[in-house]
Image: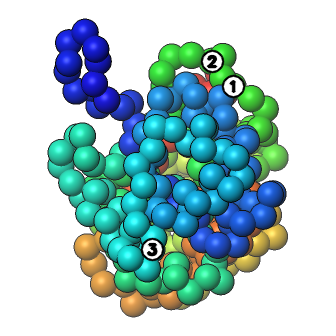
Amino acid sequence: MMTNDSLTIVKPRLRIGLIANRAHQDAPDSALVKLFQRAAKSIQALEIEWVVVGRTLDAIQAHGLLEQCSPHVRFPYGRDGGLMKLVAHVVNSDPHNSIDAVIYLIDPVDHSSIFPEALALKRQCVIHRKPFLSTLAAACEWLELEALATGSRSHFTDTLGLDLQHESIALIAHDALILFMLQIAEKDFALFYQFAHRYATGTTGSLLNQLAQKRKGEEAGRHWVQPFLSGPMGGDAQIAELVLERKIRRIVFLEDPHVARQHEADIQLLERAARTVTDFALVVSDGEGSDRWLRLLSERLS
């Protein structure tokens, strides 16, 4: 944007890529419509410039939401390379052209969600430490927490329904990121302690319980986290079942995007479970984003 006084180009506070699969954009009560309804005050506070893939922008206009999605940049339809352009802008280092976060409301049965450009979009977001928000619940909460970071609480709503004493969280980390997970748990131990239940896979769960024993004593910390099987042995599937049953709402899944993963199907299964209950579940997939999310969540609860 350009100011009249100085004729200086000013970068918007946030540039957010936006795309929704067909099932999440057509109906009046679709996830896309709910996003702009539930997060209206947060969107206003954040001064967002939206970068929207063609058909999603068509749906926004059809629902009469174009004013709430302004200013915006229109990208081509997905079939014409719109999603590919989003990937390119995620990795772009130019602050005036790069995208700061991506909201991709994914329908888990839409085959386009497993196209190479869709998978690359998430991977590059993780690599470049940019939020990749694929459920309605994750997008709404992230927008509200980022609005909190602007310093104003006037936009707050009760839509988050924060009640950690009745919520559960899953903590998963690939081998190269287990140490970072332990550092997060050490720093945010008081926040994690508020959850009714904590779950983890394999080695991560055992190490988190060792940390809890140091903090709370051997007996009190022994079962602080309920450990499931390791990811390759089916732990992701065990957690996915609880997500589908709405018993686990929040998932911190620290992924290492640089290694081939033999249990990739299990990882996708867990993500698919979260997207199946899009209005309920939240997944955070990178370390820096998880750290910021937990810090802002603590501030939101204070």
Give the side of residue 210 with respect to residue 125, left or right.
right
Task: Tell me where residue 2 appears, x and y as whole percent.
Answer: 28, 24
**What element does badge 3 sit on?**
helix
Look at the numbered discs 2 and 1 and tell me whether their residues touch, using CB distance below 8 Å.
yes
**What element does badge 1 sit on?**
loop
Residue depicted at x 20% and y 18%: 7
Residue depicted at x 66% and y 45%: 65
Q: Mark 2 points at which residue?
A: 153
Q: Which is in the foreground here, disc 3 or disc 1?
A: 3
Q: Residues within 10 Å of mark 1 (few under 14, many from 20)?
A: some
Report the residue that reaches farthest toward the top: 5
Q: What residue type is labelled 2?
A: Arg
Q: Which of pointers 3 and 2 lies earlier in the amino acid sequence?
A: 3
Whole-angstrom CA distance, mark 3 to mark 2, is 37 Å
- Compared to residue 232, the image places residue 89 above or below, namely above
Q: Which is in the foreground here, disc 3 or disc 2?
A: 3
Mark number displayed over residue 78: 3
Q: How is the image coloured?
A: rainbow
- Compared to residue 36, the image places residue 200 above or below, namely below
Whole-angstrom CA distance, mark 2 to mark 1, is 6 Å
- Compared to residue 255, the image places residue 190 above or below, namely above
Q: Name the residue under label 1.
A: 156
